[in-house]
Amino acid sequence: MPGFLRAVFLTIGVVIAGLAPCAAFAITTDDLYQSRTIVTGQGEVNRQIGFKDCLDRVLVRVSGDQRLLEKPEMAALRDKAGDFVETFRYHDRLEGIPIHDEQGTHDRPHDLTCLYKPATVNKLLAQLGGKPWLGERPTLAVFLTVEQGARHFALSAEEERGKTMRESFANATDPLLMHVVFPKAAQLAELGEKGLRTNDMARLDLLAKRAGGAQALAGSIVWSDKELGWIADWRLADHGKTYRWQVRGVSFDDAFRVAIGGAARILSGNGQP
């Protein structure tokens, strides 16, 4: 093959690879050891509240283990949360919108971003019996069935009824630096809704790779009038073991946060959600 054509085909291959879903994402230290929350204004009182929330968030972000926040030791750590922050910055969420006559900057919502030294966070995790979850974080292919009365469908990449749910799932991944993809309708048609609920995780993991993920996160959400919310069941396989967990009577936003939080706990080596 002439050198010119070889270069052209190589360039095309690189572009295609760049457009394809990535099965895993490398995590940088800067990304990992920071967290963000929303506060009102830049005053000291609200800043301290924000520091506490950011501490919770960074401990979960680095460890992948939400249960650390339930430890009794967290109360004392939250009381001095600001001591652990290396630097912080604000971003006005209403930037570009003029201040109203009766509104000062102290009333405006701001993003508070806190940055931490890895050694500081790692030491706190050790005190809580946790550890950092470093390295690549796999992209999860979500196989989800949705049932609300007579309305039911499998959530695909193209499903118009599921657009809000896909956005909600993506939002749930951000605090843990994880990513999700959704299979195309044609891939789901091979299984059917019953197959999505009953197929073993080994087969779903194979299909996950075809969808651009590293492994499958399978689940179902069913609306319950009795529970006044969704009942969500989740499955994920890791190292030959299939884990199952459930949440009841919640919004689908909360159901997806529980899904991602549970997956993170498993994949970080912290066991059953």
Image (cartoon, rainbow, N blue to C red):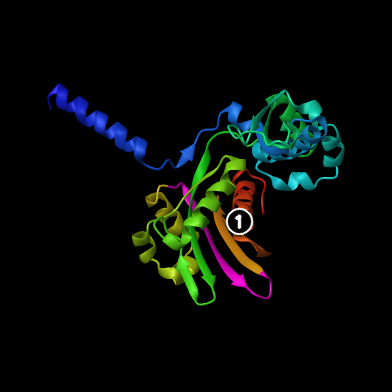
Looking at the image, can residue 93 be seen? yes
**Residue 206 is drawn in which quadrant?**
bottom left
Residue at 54% across / 54% down in the picture?
A: 237
At 44% across and 42% down in the image, what residue appears? 23
Q: In the rendered view, tell whether residue 1 sits above or below residue 141.
A: above
Q: How many marks?
A: 1
Q: Main secondary structure of the magenta part?
A: strand
**Magenta run includes residue 272:** no
Locate residue 186, reporting x and y percent. Answer: 34, 61
Q: Quadrant of the N terminus?
A: top left
Which portion, as a residue range, is magenta? Answer: 213-228
Q: Nearer the viewer, residue 87 or 3?
A: 87
Q: Report x, y in % for residue 15.
A: 30, 33
Query: In this picture, is 76 found above or below 263?
Result: above
Where is 213 relative to 254, above or below? above
Q: Which residue is mark 1?
A: 253
> From the viewer's perspective, is 43 left or right of 4?
right
Which residue shows up at 61% across the image and 64% down it?
232
Q: Quadrant of residue 174?
A: top right
Q: Position of residue 176 (x, y in %)?
A: 61, 42
Q: Which residue appears farthest toward the front when viewing the image?
A: 101
Decide if residue 240 is in sight here: no
Q: Amino acid at mark 1?
A: Asp
Query: Which residue is painted at 47% across and 56% down in the image?
Result: 163
